[in-house]
Image (cartoon, helix red, strand yellow):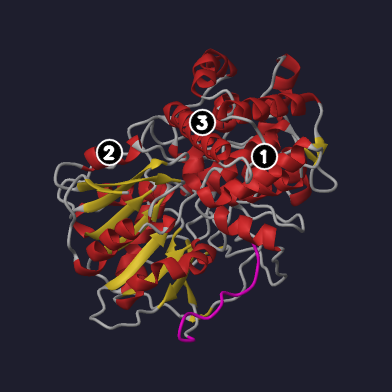
Amino acid sequence: MQNPHGLRAAAVTTTAVLLSALLAGCGGDDRDAGTPVTAVRGGTGANLAAQKLDWKDCPAPSEAEGGGTAPSPLPGGARWQCATLQAPLDWDKPHGETIGIALIRAKATGPGERVGSLIFNFGGPGGSGITSLPAFASDYEPLRARFDLVSFDPRGVGRSAPVKCLSDAELDRYFQQDATPDDAAETSTYLKNTETFNKACEKNSARILPHVRTTDVARDMDLMRQVLGDDKLYYFGISYGTELGGVYAHLFPRNVGRAVFDGVVDPTKDPKQSALGQAKGFQQALDNFANDCAAHPDECPIGTSAQDVKDRIARFLKDLDSKPIPGVPSRKLTQTAATNGIAQSLYSEDFWPYLTEGLEQAYDGDGRILMLLSDAMNGRDEDGRYSNVIPANGAVNCSDDKPRYTVADVERSLPEFRAASPVFGDFLAWGMLSCTAWPVPGAADRPDVSAPGSAPILVVGNTGDPATPYEGAKNMARALGKGVGVELTYRGQGHGAYDSGNRCVQSTVNTYLLDGKVPKDGTVCT
């Protein structure tokens, strides 16, 4: 989904963690500003590949990572370990300045021979792997038998030279804006707000902004592979992590060992096509929610039929455009925040009860739950502190994506977006302007993921995925190349498949990663 600055739903697996923290009231004060850009004199690519990591007990997450407490011990009492990998700031100048890439790991437990390190990217761009891996670790515990589980904050994220833009107070004001302007005056304000955000990023993060492209992160991962001591990369990418994995496979096809892509970004679509696909995906998810709601009226008393549920949501959002309601003090639940919150709740079927309760309360004039859902999407905690998920997301997307859309482009596209989704269409169409005033040029219309010579890569698509629509998995498998992309389909709901808990998906993925057994292309799990 996109917020006023264009945050893509393909990007945000970690919002589940943020939402959990918000609704549980968790927090922590042991934070820092992240790892700064540092200079290492005489550093060379060869020296960096030979560096030794100094693993220590993990501290509490930094503010840029979203805050909280240090990760709890693993089953059996083992503690999470963290270290910092030095990588070139500019991969075109490998002998120059370096930045620190923050890593986290849980060592393999056995039984069975250790395969290597399994590196995770949970999505974004902008999501912190340092916080996500411990949050989802129980799902991946079977893989720890033969792998060290490893994740990281990609460059520009969390502790890894984080991109910084507006202050917390400025972000609060920024997210109160109308992200679906209706006239020339509102459009002018929207453009000015976007320009202010982008200029703040340039002012506060000029050194790192040119160096956060997905190709840069892929090169960091290959350095990581070498430093961790693996001849091949073992990888688990989710959401945006699938695009990162595809780019890695394109750049280093001979270095791919076993890789899983789950919740797959479609590499064949340009930014407009991706946004339109998300409009359709989120509308489908909302339709599924409404159908389920109508089938369980005692548990979901917000409409007499599926169409009534959707009609009431549409009327409610229209009313909010001119009459916001109280949200989280002292902020109002605006049309933009409510749309963002509804989208957040569609990432997982587990979130549907929050949406039901949030709408029920909002119809009575209390927007708190929908505001909390929107805050989770935007990386805001209950104390008003923001992670850097939004700045990092914008920095990577705008550095990767070459198109720079205009107001005229949006206005021409609105009918198509509205046809795709009467609820989310305008929101996603206007989000196309988020990179228009970005200070760094974009790299390409689409990522190149062709990977001839790579080992087989397991591509997992979910038929009910709102954020990365199902067709993306098939397109990714084809784009990787014949004999490389192997497709696994899950007929389910929500963003991604493995973390749904489906036994067929988990068994198929685990067997492939642990034993190297590649499933038959086209396997279906229900």
Magenta region's main secondary structure? loop
Point out the tag, 2 or 3, that comes first from the N-terminus: 3
Q: Nearer the viewer, residue 180 or 401?
A: 180
Q: Nearer the viewer, residue 425 or 430?
A: 425
Q: Which mark is residue 283?
A: 3
- Residue 324 found in image quarter: top right
> Residue 82, image x and y in percent?
49, 75
What SS does tag 2 mark?
helix
Mark 1 surroundings: few (<14), some (14-19) or many (≥20) residues within 10 A: some
Give the residues in magenta: 66-77
Q: Nearer the viewer, residue 258 or 494?
A: 494
CA distance separating discs 1 and 2: 38 Å
CA distance separating discs 2 and 3: 21 Å
Residue visible at 30% across and 55% down? 260
**Residue 24 in the figure: left or right of residue 92:** right
Residue visible at 73% across and 39% down? 174
> Residue 144, image x and y in percent?
35, 74
**Residue 56 in the figure: left or right of residue 4:** left
Q: Nearer the viewer, mark 2 or mark 3?
A: 3
Residue assigned mark 1: 301
**Residue 110 in the figure: left or right of residue 329:** left
